[in-house]
Image: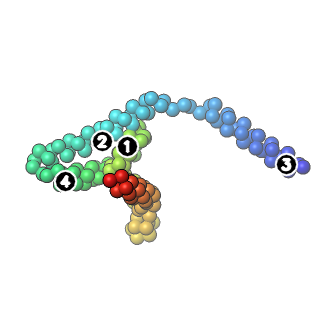
Amino acid sequence: MYEEKNEALKAAEKQEYKDLVNRVKPKPPLLVNCLWAFGVGGLICLIGQLFLNYLLNIGMNKADAGSATAVIMIFIGALLTGLGVYDKIGEKAGAGSIVPITGFANVIVASAMEFKKEGYIFGVGARIFSIAGPTLLFGFVASVLIGLVALIIK
């Protein structure tokens, strides 16, 4: 009987604490955060589009220019992550910095840097895709499902 009352008291205290935290914690400026995400994500896409347009204007065909643009954007994302700049962009822009190619490069490089201290084989080599792996898996599954739906519709 005493244990049941004690458990009920602990549960009530936990709920009271959660309520207090929810009342006291600052509310994030949702509109400002959305504008930052939209602006930074759009800027990253604009930079990619400028590279693509430049490569097309110097005579590359569309497929090669698209591939070269992807490589350039991955390099920029990886370089900015290595220099510690991409994390600062992500702090301010939030989801806007997760534009697919540069965001993916950021995830790969950041996890490689995190596990470097464990060595190149058992650290970087074994764990580099620990964060990106689920992204790849669900991306592959989604693309297969979308491809099957497209095949069935046609």
In percent of the image, x 29 and y 41: which residue is there?
Answer: 45
> Going by the image, does 75 lie left or right of 26?
left
x, y (%) of residue 74?
29, 52
Residue type highlighted by circle 3: Glu
Q: CA distance from mark 4 to mark 2?
A: 20 Å
Q: Earlier in the sequence, mark 4 or mark 2?
A: 2
Residue 141, image quadrant:
bottom left
Q: Secondary structure at mark 3?
A: helix
Pointer 2 or 3: first along the chain:
3
- Of tags 4 and 3, the one toward the viewer is 4
Residue 78, compared with residue 50, is above or below; it is below
**Type of the residue with mark 4:** Ala
Residue 33 or residue 122, whichever sits in front: 33
Which badge, 4 or 3, comes first in the chain's sequence? 3
Measured Cα–Cα span from mark 1 to mark 2:
8 Å
* Residue at the spot 67% in from the left edge and 34% down from the top edge: 20
Q: Residues within 10 Å of mark 2 (few under 14, many from 20)?
A: some
Q: Which label belongs to residue 6? A: none
Of mark 3 and mark 1, the one earlier in the sequence is 3
Q: Secondary structure at mark 2?
A: helix
Mark linked to residue 97 = 1
Tag 1–tag 2 contact (CB < 8 Å): yes
Mark 4 or mark 1: name the one nearer the start of the chain. 4
Question: Is disc 4 surrounded by few (<14), some (14 to 19) or many (20+) residues within 10 Å?
Answer: few
Q: Are marks 4 and 1 in contact (CB under 8 Å)?
A: no
Q: Which residue is mark 2?
A: 44
Q: Residue at 38% x, 45% y: name it.
A: 98
Residue assigned mark 3: 4
Residue at position x 22%, y 54% in the image: 67
Q: Quadrant of residue 110?
A: bottom left
Q: Secondary structure at mark 4?
A: helix
**Callout 1, which amino acid?**
Ser
